Image (cartoon, rainbow, N blue to C red):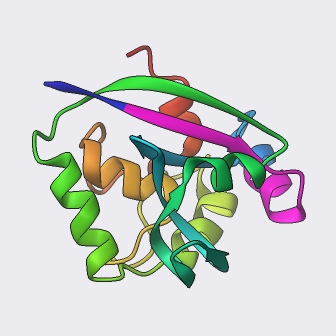
Amino acid sequence: MTKVKLIFGRSNKAVGLLIRFFDISPWSHVGIVHGDYVYESVGMRYKGRLGRRKGVICTHIDDFKGRYSAWREKEIDCYNENWFADLQHMVRVKTEYDMMATIGALWLLRLFRVKLGSRHAHNCSEMVNVVTRRFRSDHNATVADFWYLQH
């Protein structure tokens, strides 16, 4: 088992407020830190140092911190020894953002906690779950799930 550093962001935009409300979480976004970069899945086209993209992207940590009103880092246990190779692969193949899972998470999260969107597209917390393997693959992992993990 290895450790992975996560970074959480708090957005005060409408979507961020909805995510925080339905997720009962102080955070609306999560990514994985590696060196000076953050691997994250974004739903809106983001213009960063690597061009305009959405889905799983790699951004400089300063860009990530600048987009949020608050942020925090946290280390968690990772059950995937090849986690970094998996992240690089997601960026390389341009893994899409899973909007259906995000919408489903907002409305159905508290009732069913079942993954709703595509198996080949991920919102931010699903991407972290696929890489770290902390929860079952059919579990709709949320930002709060990772924030409240003890280790």
How many marks the image carries: the answer is: 0
Task: Determine whether, in the image, residue 96 is placed left or right of residue 87.
Answer: right
Magenta segment, which residues?
A: 5-19
Residue 136 visible in the displayed image = no
What residue is drawn where x is 54% and y is 55%? 60
Picture coordinates of residue 140, whole percent (x, y): 44, 54
Task: Determine whether, in the image, residue 99 is placed left or right of residue 81.
Answer: right
**141 is higher (above) or lower (below) than 25:** below
What residue is drawn where x is 42% and y is 57%? 126
Specify whether residue 15 is painted magenta: yes
- Write down the quadrant of residue 96 in the picture: bottom left
Residue 112 visible in the displayed image = yes
Picture coordinates of residue 30, whole percent (x, y): 56, 46
- Write down the quadrant of residue 16 in the picture: bottom right
Specify whether residue 23 is painted magenta: no
Picture coordinates of residue 49, whole percent (x, y): 57, 72
Picture coordinates of residue 117, whole percent (x, y): 44, 76
What residue is drawn where x is 27% and y is 78%? 92
Q: Nearer the viewer, residue 137 or 84?
A: 84
Image quarter in which the C terminus is found: top left
**34 is higher (above) or lower (below) than 96:** above
**144 is higher (above) or lower (below) than 121:** above
Image quarter in which the N terminus is found: top left
